[in-house]
Image (cartoon, helix red, strand yellow):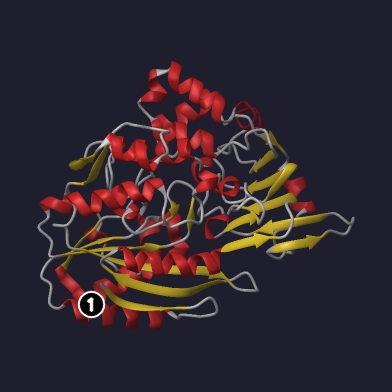
Amino acid sequence: MIYFEKGAPDAVLSNEDLKNGLFEALDKLGSKSKVLAIPPDYTRLPSKAGELTAFSYQYYGEKLCDILPALGTHSPMTDEQITHMFPEVPHSLFRIHDWRNDVITLGEVPGDFIENVSDGKVNFSWPAQVNKLLVDGNFDLILSLGQVVPHEVVGMANYNKNIFVGTGGSEGINKSHFIGAAYGMEKMMGRADTPVRKVFNYATDHFAQHLPIVYVQTVVGVDDEGKLVTRGLFIGDDFEVFEKAAELSLKVNFDMLEKPLKKVVVWLDPTEFKSTWLGNKSIYRTRMAMANDGELIVLAPALKEFGEDKQIDVLIRKYGYFGTPATLKAVDENEDLQENLGAAAHLIHGSSEGRFNITYCPGKNPWNLSKNEIESVGFNYADIDAMTKKYNPEKLKNGFNMMSDGEEIFYISNPALGLWAFKERFK
């Protein structure tokens, strides 16, 4: 059922609009005595989920008992990040999701179902895992808050992904990522109905009907001046509310191009992107737009690690981003990757498959990744000072730019907010 919907490609929703829409939906739900909020973490700062969580606290007060950021495999939020993202929400309400230890399994999606939806690419079963707080907390409302946007693992982010990945366990996260990678990321990105989504929906329909989840979903874009703007708010408890948000997100976040891109420059905001685990969105989101033998330049001043999780960081350093055949071979031959299929999927996602060049430009602090580290995992390295002098983010506009020497580049100020594709590749 949909409790609130408002949005259009040219809509501009203020924080007051979001608050009024949320309160209207919560009024329809009736009185609640114990509420859990599941927002994204700081890596999804532009989602407006922070403000919506704060509005939820304003509405429910002490009845909002717990806030569980959907970390997935990300690092726990710092006090400074909580203060910034969730204004005036008590820190005492926040819980840390431990994806390796704090989960329970609601049920198993059968392997023959997964084999069917993945066109035979994989045939293992999949555990529907969630943080045990969702079940043991005896909540009469669970608010899942977040942004619907094109996504490399599931096609379009959010809805039940926020539950089964954001609060999921090691096996469930790893296997879901691998299903998508094995099936083919480029066949999924920008689509609401994908093999991974079918698996999540099966789990929702068969194992999670007893959980009182209501989804609060935004669609956020960038205006002509490069500023973030909220285009939609959709609140409901079933797949229809996700479909409506995904339909708008395609119009807002998907840039279909008439020609492939020979050179793309991506800026990674230092407050948001500190790892290639996240920073490789610059690769995921542009790969369908890149020309053969094109160059992707990633300006990453805060890049300090490959994986936010220490074990995954070790695996990325060991195996690198060398393409699907090399990664699948490594999975077949190495137990450490077999036990971390999510890392294997990420290695596939982060490769250009040899089709275009990827150049990372980390900062020059002692804690930044070094030239040797960058090159050891299969990327090219370039000096960030030289590159930012040539391609100054403060002077570039999103989209095509003509440089003083006649070179045409395509600039992206935040890869997390969009998907770019040459139209001939998106079929």
- Amino acid on which the number 1 mark rests in the picture: Leu
- Whether residue 157 sits left or right of residue 61 in the image: it is right
Quadrant location of the N terminus in the rendered image? bottom left
- Whether residue 123 sits left or right of residue 368 in the image: it is left
**Relative vertical location of residue 101 with respect to residue 254 in this rendering, above or below:** above
Q: How many marks?
A: 1
Circle 1 sits in a helix, a strand or a loop, which is it? helix
Given residues 79 and 246, the one toward you in this image is 246
Q: Which residue is painted at 40% across and 57% down in the image? A: 81
Given residues 383 and 206, the one toward you in this image is 206
Q: In the rendering, at what x and y percent does residue 27 appear?
A: 21, 81
- Whether residue 422 sits left or right of residue 169 in the image: it is right
Q: Which residue is painted at 39% across and 83% down in the image? A: 16
Q: In the rendering, at what x and y percent does residue 96 appear?
A: 27, 49
The residue singled out by tag 1 in the image is: 26
Q: Is residue 165 visible?
A: no
